[in-house]
Image (cartoon, helix red, strand yellow):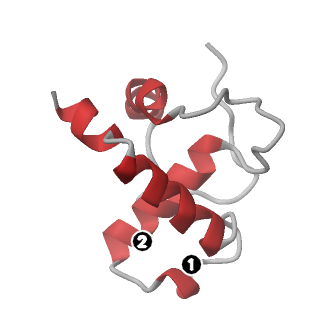
Amino acid sequence: MLILRMSRRPYPSDVDDETYLFMRPYLLLAPEHHPARKYPLREVLNAALWIARTGSQWAYLPHDFPPYKIVHQQVLRWFEQGCFENMAH
């Protein structure tokens, strides 16, 4: 399976290929190529992991990630849908 590579330099918090392939089915609330999806799912996840790892405020998310409001909104959707709980079971 082809894994999308980002055009930016990686952060230590970025998800590795194996972990992403495990998480991906749980996080797909809409098809990956849905017209409303403007940013790659993996980059949204990497941005959320950067926030979780650094403890930074959303507004301080580095500019090479998708916009923080998009990431925050998606993370809220994941929590509302129980995506992370489903991964743990």
* Relative depth, front residue between 16 and 44: 44
Residue 11 in view: no
Q: Secondary structure at mark 2?
A: helix
Given the current orientation, which residue lies at the most extreme front position? Answer: 80
Q: Earlier in the sequence, mark 1 or mark 2?
A: 2
Between 58 and 46, the one lying in front of the other is: 58
Q: Is residue 26 above or below residue 83?
A: above
Pick whichever, 22 or 72, lies toward us.
Answer: 72
Q: Position of residue 72 (x, y in %)?
A: 52, 67
- Crowd band around label 2 with a 10 angstrom C-alpha radius: few (<14), some (14–19), many (20+): many
Q: Quadrant of residue 71?
A: bottom right
Asked if the residue under mark 2 is in contact with the one under mark 1, i.e. CB atoms within 8 Å, the reply is yes
Question: Which residue is drawn at the image coordinates 56% and 86% (left, top)?
Answer: 59
The picture quadrant where one finds residue 19 is: top left
Alpha carbon separation for disc pair 1 and 2: 7 Å
Residue with the mark numbered 1: 61
Q: Position of residue 47 (x, y in %)?
A: 53, 62
